[in-house]
Amino acid sequence: MDTPLLLTGVHPDHTTARRLASLGLRRGSRIELVQRLAGGGRIVSVAGGRVAVDAAVLRELSAEVAA
């Protein structure tokens, strides 16, 4: 879980994508998975903060290992 990731794709729904962007989760952001939650959600570290993301939204995001 300590592997830094680069967010390469965001949620296709415009409203959700805007909300995620306001939390720092936008294409090109570096994130780290911090904790797994019950139900498949995750806590992610982004831009010095932590954000809880549910399983449904996670399925719509794509990321790759950051160089």
Image (cartoon, rainbow, N blue to C red):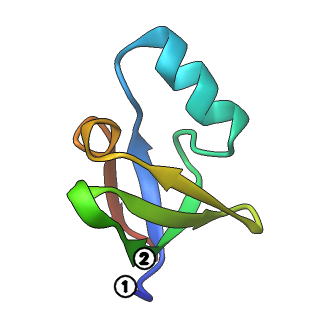
Q: Residues within 10 Å of mark 2 (few under 14, many from 20)?
A: few
Residue 49, image x and y in percent?
73, 64
* Residue at image point 74% right, 61% down: 47
Q: Nearer the viewer, residue 8 or 40?
A: 40
Residue pictured at 27% horizontal, 35% vertical: 60
Image vertical order of residue 32 relative to residue 12, above or below: below
Q: Amino acid at mark 1?
A: Met
> What percent of the width, then of the height, locates residue 4?
48, 77
Given the current orientation, which residue lies at the most extreme right position?
48
In the depicted view, which residue is nearer to us: 56 or 11? Answer: 56
Chain-order first, disc 2 or disc 1: 1
Q: Secondary structure at mark 2?
A: strand
Relative vertical location of residue 53 with respect to residue 4 in this rendering, above or below: above
Up-down relation of residue 45 to residue 58 (above or below): below
Judged from the image, the secondary structure of the residue bearing numbered disc 1 is loop
**Label 1 neighbour load within 10 Å: few <14, some 14-19, many 20+:** few
Amino acid type, residue under disc 2 in the picture: Gln
**Residue 43 image point, x, y percent:** 48, 65
User: Residue 18 vs residue 35: left or right?
Assistant: right
- Percent position of residue 8, x then y: 40, 46
Residue behind mark 1: 1
- Which mark is on residue 35? 2
- Left or right of 37 on screen, residue 39: left
Q: In front: mark 2 or mark 1? A: 2
